[in-house]
Image (cartoon, rainbow, N blue to C red):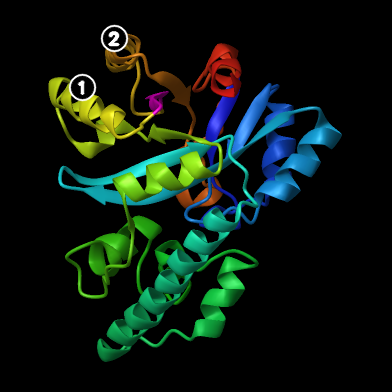
Amino acid sequence: MIDLHLHSTHSDGTLSPTELVEMACKNELLAIAITDHDTVSGITEAQQAGVKNNIGVIAGVELSVESADGYFHLLGYDFDHEHPRIIDALEKLQHSRMQRNLEMLERLKDMGIKISFEELKKESQIGQIGRPHIAKVLRQKGLVKSIDQAFDRYLRKGKPAYVSREILSLNEAIALLKQAGGKAVLAHPVQIGYSIDKIKGLLKKMKSTGLDGIETYYPTQKGRVQRQLTKIAEELALLETGGSDYHGDIRANTGMAGKGRLEVPDALYYNLLI
């Protein structure tokens, strides 16, 4: 079994890349991918830990993208994570994230809620700062009871502290991954909120711009839905991937893939590397 959708402390997860590899070892996984949001800074550590633990670690990233059809998450796999264009593009996205964080703190301040940037840095450890870290500080201050409540009350789109940020277009993101020798995969398609037929139409259009695959195995895509997505992947000659989207204790109800949980076939890993 494998898990190709994991987040570490380098973005909004609570476990380090090494800790994720060690957990994967305990779960008897063949391979994993660290797919942090808009950053590749945890990949080298994960790959080094993978060698020590005899677990394959694919270079991965999760990019927020937009097109005329909406807003999506795109997973990048098996690319050169030290490619200059990847580094340059992600640095620009990181700068946009930083500006967004500062603006959100200002909005919270206007509502009488004071959170310092130092508090966020402490919460994020070595990783990039994002909304989950603001949510955790709000919880620590007793202003909300949970991470979900922080998002619902302050941080989700349409809420008073929400600030948008710069993201790549779908075409830009696919081209970027291709330039670095990688593959582009649409993440958790059912979460987009489209019907299966509309997802198929969307995938046809995305494939024409270079999309390589679709995440067919995902915690909320089980049974009939997963089989429908697999059929679409076969009909459109798209790769299949799968993963838990595990973030650690940020999402307490989601565990890493493994026996008795989300079971992603090894064949998807080998197909991805061809």
Q: Is residue 5 visible?
A: yes
Residue drawn at point x = 51 percent, y = 40 percent: 246
Residue drawn at point x = 48 percent, y = 60 percent: 89
Instruction: Please name the residue that numbered disc 1 is placed on.
Output: 200
Q: 59 or 248: which is nearer to us?
A: 59
Sequence-wise first label, 1 or 2: 1
Start-end of magenta stretch: 212-217
Position above or below: 269 against 95 = above
**Looking at the image, do the residues carrying marks 1 and 2 touch, with CB atoms under 8 Å apart?**
yes
Viewed as shown, does residue 224 lie left or right of 124?
left
Structural crowding at the residue carrying mark 2, measured as other residues with C-alpha within 10 Å and reported as few (<14), some (14–19) or many (≥20)? few
Instruction: Please name the residue that numbered disc 2 is placed on.
Output: 235
User: Which SS class for mark 1?
Assistant: helix
Q: Quadrant of residue 197?
A: top left
Viewed as shown, does residue 167 lie left or right of 184?
left
Give coordinates of residue 50: x percent, y percent.
Answer: 77, 35
